[in-house]
Image: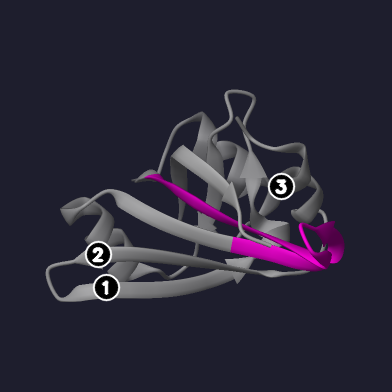
Amino acid sequence: MIPEKLTEVLKHDGVVAIATLGQDGPHMVNTWNSYVRITDDERILIPVGYMHRTEANIAFNNQVLITLGSRKVDGNMGPGAGFLIKGTACIEVSGSDFAVVKAKFAWARAVMAVTASSIEQTL
């Protein structure tokens, strides 16, 4: 389900935007492409440093929207490829997913594990 083009995008500089919905409405945070990891079972792992409101929103409503891209990967209309990922997320502070992320990013206090329900190339 994870497109090869998406894994190529993750190898290049770029911003990742994560949208959640909580009791106070929508909220967005950013991270970097280089922080995102894909598991063997195609879940998306994102290290969590702060993201306290994001964590609270996921506890309230686990639906997330994620966009990411890179200008260095050819897309649908020339230079630049981008994706919209819809899915469900959980915040984990222990376990194998957390251990993988913590080993790479010592500053991570948790990991956001996302199971994608759809991945659409938008650029």
**72 within the magenta span:** yes
As drawn, the label of residue 21 is: 2
**Which comes sooner in the sequence, label 3 or label 2?**
3
Tell me the kind of residue under disc 2.
Leu
Which residue position is annotated with label 3? 6
The front one of 47 and 61 is 61
Q: Is residue 64 left or right of residue 72?
A: left
Q: Main secondary structure of the magenta part?
A: strand
Residue 92, image x and y in percent?
39, 43
- Please give the name of the residue rendered at 45% of the width and 43% of the height, measured from the top-left corner: 114
- Please give the name of the residue rendered at 49% of the width and 59% of the height, measured from the top-left corner: 66
Q: Is residue 12 above or below residue 89?
A: below
Q: Is residue 112 left or right of residue 39?
A: left
- Please give the name of the residue rendered at 86% of the width and 59% of the height, measured from the top-left corner: 74
Which stretch is magenta?
A: 68-87
**Which comes sooner in the sequence, label 1 or label 3?**
3
**Which comes sooner in the sequence, label 1 or label 2?**
2
As drawn, the label of residue 41 is: none
Which SS class for mark 1?
Answer: strand
The front one of 18 and 123 is 123
Instruction: Tell me whether circle 3 and circle 2 mark residues in contact (CB < 8 Å).
Output: no
- Please give the name of the residue rendered at 45% of the width and 73% of the height, measured from the top-left corner: 29
Which residue position is annotated with label 1? 26
Instruction: Tell me whether circle 1 and circle 2 mark residues in contact (CB < 8 Å).
Output: yes
